[in-house]
Image (cartoon, rainbow, N blue to C red):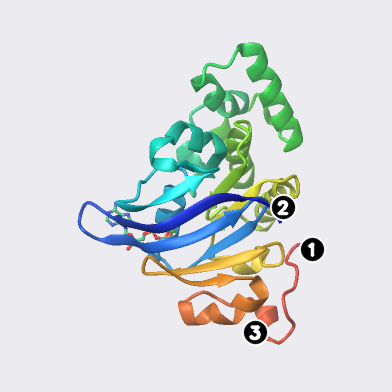
């Protein structure tokens, strides 16, 4: 039985205007899980993800990552848990793909030789090495999203959070990013994905969590959860709707 990596205990979050974004969330996440976070617009998915790496802090309750309280261990938490944001363009800061991926290591004052080695390895692993001199803003949506993933991966996180990783991607871009995420999970990373696009990866997921109004409504194995999706405003995959069970989306 793999160990727990994240433990969330009765977490609440109230925004400055008084809106309650999370209400009494409790759950735990084990190493190596592949979790889909589902729920309609405004259900609290992004708010939840931002708590996991300390971008937002709970006003009551606590989140433990590897047995350390996130609120008191922000740097340690962000090394363990990386987040790929919905808008990959907004994350771009470098003039070249190489600089873009090196950015986080430079901030941490790694030595130049170490940075070059780590960035090259990650770019090769993600099949991006040939793009290393390109300006990231000129790349396709799928390439940009992979570069955002490379920028997180270079920091060696154990857990990677993805907020709508397929938004604005075409078919090829979606395949590219989905294969990358599956490989990351197979190589031992814990994956949590907030998405409206359940069909694309339901076969890969070990667990689906459905949120509504800042509350967890369902949490379980994909086979057990799939028939509850529509009653919470999330599209049930066509294969399941037509009685064909859960079918892989990748060709
Ligand atoms: N800074 C803020 N101040 C007040 N309310 C906020 C703030 N950020 C988010 N909210 C509200 O919290 C709720 C949850 O927002 P969140 O972004 O977590 O939803 P989501 O499930 O990620 O939605 P989507 O599917 O559209 O990405 C929404 O009602 C939103 O308006
Ligand atoms: Mg969101």
Closer to us: 208 or 98: 208
| Residue 213 drawn at (x, y percent) | 36, 69
Q: Is mark 3 within 8 Å of ligand 1?
A: no
Which of the 4 quarters of the picture holds residue 207?
bottom right
Secondary structure type for disc 3? helix
- Can the viewer see residue 54? no
Residue 247 percent across, percent down from the top left: 75, 73
The residue pinned by badge 3 equals 241
Q: Is residue 171 left or right of residue 152?
A: right
Q: For the residues marked 1 and 3, what is the alpha-carbon distance in whole angstroms? A: 20 Å
| Quadrant location, ligand no. 1 | bottom left
Q: Closer to the camera, 174 or 161?
A: 161
- Give the quadrant of the C terminus: bottom right
Q: Residue furthest bottom?
A: 243
Q: Is residue 33 left or right of residue 79?
A: right
Residue at x 65%, y 71% (from the top left corner): 222
Numbered tag placed on residue 251 in the rendering: 1
Which mark is first along the chain, 3 or 1? 3
Q: Nearer the viewer, mark 1 or mark 2?
A: 2
Q: Is residue 191 above or below residue 196?
A: above
- Mark 2 or 3 closer to N-term? 2
Which residue sits at x=69%, y=30%?
Answer: 131
* Label 2 to label 3: alpha-carbon separation: 25 Å
Left or right of residue 64, residue 117 in this image: right
């Amino acid at each position: 039985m793999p160990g727990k990596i994240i433990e969330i205990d009765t977490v609440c979050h109230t925004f400055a205007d008084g809106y309650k974004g999370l209400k009494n969330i409790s759950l735990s996440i084990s190493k190596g899980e592949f979790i889909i976070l589902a729920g309609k617009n405004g259900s609290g998915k992004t708010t939840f993800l931002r708590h996991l790496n300390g971008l937002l802090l709970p006003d009551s309750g606590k989140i433990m990552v590897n047995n350390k309280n996130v609120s008191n261990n922000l740097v340690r938490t962000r090394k363990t848990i990386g987040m790929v944001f919905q808008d990959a363009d907004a994350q771009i800061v470098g003039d070249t793909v190489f600089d873009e991926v090196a950015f986080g290591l430079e901030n941490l004052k790694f030595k130049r030789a170490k940075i070059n080695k780590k960035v090259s390895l990650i770019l090769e692993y993600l099949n991006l090495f040939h793009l290393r001199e390109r300006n990231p803003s000129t790349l396709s949506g799928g390439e940009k999203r992979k570069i955002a993933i490379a920028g997180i991966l270079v920091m060696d996180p154990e857990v990677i959070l993805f907020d709508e990783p397929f938004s604005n991607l075409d078919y090829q871009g979606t395949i590219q990013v989905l294969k990358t995420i599956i490989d990351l999970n197979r190589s031992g990373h814990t994956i949590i994905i907030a998405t409206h696009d359940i069909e694309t990866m339901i076969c890969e997921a070990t667990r689906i969590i459905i949120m509504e109004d800042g509350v967890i409504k369902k949490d379980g194995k994909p086979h057990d959860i799939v028939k509850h999706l529509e009653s919470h405003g999330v599209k049930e995959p066509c294969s399941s709707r037509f009685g064909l069970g859960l079918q892989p989306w990748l060709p």
